[in-house]
Image (spheres, rainbow, N blue to C red):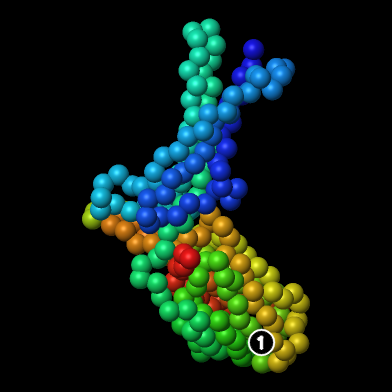
Amino acid sequence: MAVAVDIKLKRANKVYYDGPVQLVSSSMEVVKPGKLPSGRTEIPFQFPLKASGSSKVLFETYHGVYVNIQYTLRCEMKRSLLNKDVHKTCEFIVHTPAQPEPTLDTIVKFAITPASLQKLKVKSSLPNFLIKGCLNTTNCEVTRPLCGELLVEHCDLPLKSIDVQLVRVETCGCAEGYARDATEIQNLQIAEGDVCRGVAIPIHMVFPRLFTCPTLQTTNFKIEFEVNIVIILQDDHLITENFPLKLSRHLV
């Protein structure tokens, strides 16, 4: 007869916090299909959430490409020789504050021109343009959106699209060498087509859960974040301005 095992966390959002030792309260439920309610058994349990060793701390949950930090509960029910053991896993989320917490709400103004594109070797091929704007901050709290505005003062060629791109930069390695790789988390199109000149275009980007975390630096790996403002012209010229971000989390 088939037997199902499920794990239920007492917190609906599955979020627990690093700091003073917390108890992760949960229950294991064993169900035998086809039975009356008497065939359902619930076993409550709890355990302290802490890292092994007095000097160790927990890292925040993060789902990356080369770095993954995940916390799971695993239930295994042993059965008789002729029946397969039953397994169930359930992920829960850990939030940690960044140390030290950076000062927020420092407005960052920018102006993008052909002369400001430092990495571009041949600037004569670009049309003349001036794109201004601001970000509310580059020291960001992960539960608050990244906001700002952008306006095109002038551009000799029509525009095709304006995007805001969130990027994670993962660095892994040891004393022998490090590998650094940047990958896109999300891309938000804030304008399409040849926008009106001198009209402010709002920027509002919410940081995705699990794919972002407070900026983290350890002995063996780093997790950092950047935002790119990408302007695509009608002739497919790509104009990109990069802003490093410092993410943190304020626990109440």
Which residue lies most toward the left here?
Answer: 175
Front in this rendered view, residue 224 or 229 = 224
Residue drawn at x 48%, y 18% as measured from the top left: 78
Q: Quadrant of the N terminus?
A: top right
Q: Quadrant of residue 42?
A: top right
| Residue name at image x 41 percent, y 40 percent | 47
- Whether residue 126 is situated above or below residue 35 in the rendered picture: below
Specify whether residue 109 is in view.
yes
Q: Which residue corresponds to mark 1? A: 151
> Is 38 rendered above or below residue 109?
above
- 140 vs 37, nearest the viewer: 37
The relative height of residue 134 versus residue 213 in the rendered view (above or below) is: below
**Image vertical order of residue 62 relative to residue 207, above or below:** above
> Quick check: can you spot residue 178?
no
Which residue: 51% across, 45% down? 92
Residue 119 in percent (x, y) is at 46, 78
Q: Which residue lies furthest to the front in this view?
A: 38
> In the image, residue 179 lies at what x, y percent?
36, 56
Labels in figure, total: 1
In the picture, measured across the screen, residue 213 lies left or right of residue 154, that is left
Badge 1: residue crowd in 10 Å (few <14, some 14–19, many ≥20): some
Q: For the point 63% across and 23% down, which residue is it?
A: 40
Residue 109 is situated, as x and y percent measured from the top left of the image, at 53, 88
Considering the numbered disc 1 on the image, is that residue within a helix, a strand or a loop? strand
Which amino acid lies under the numbered mark 1 shown in the image of this protein?
A: Leu
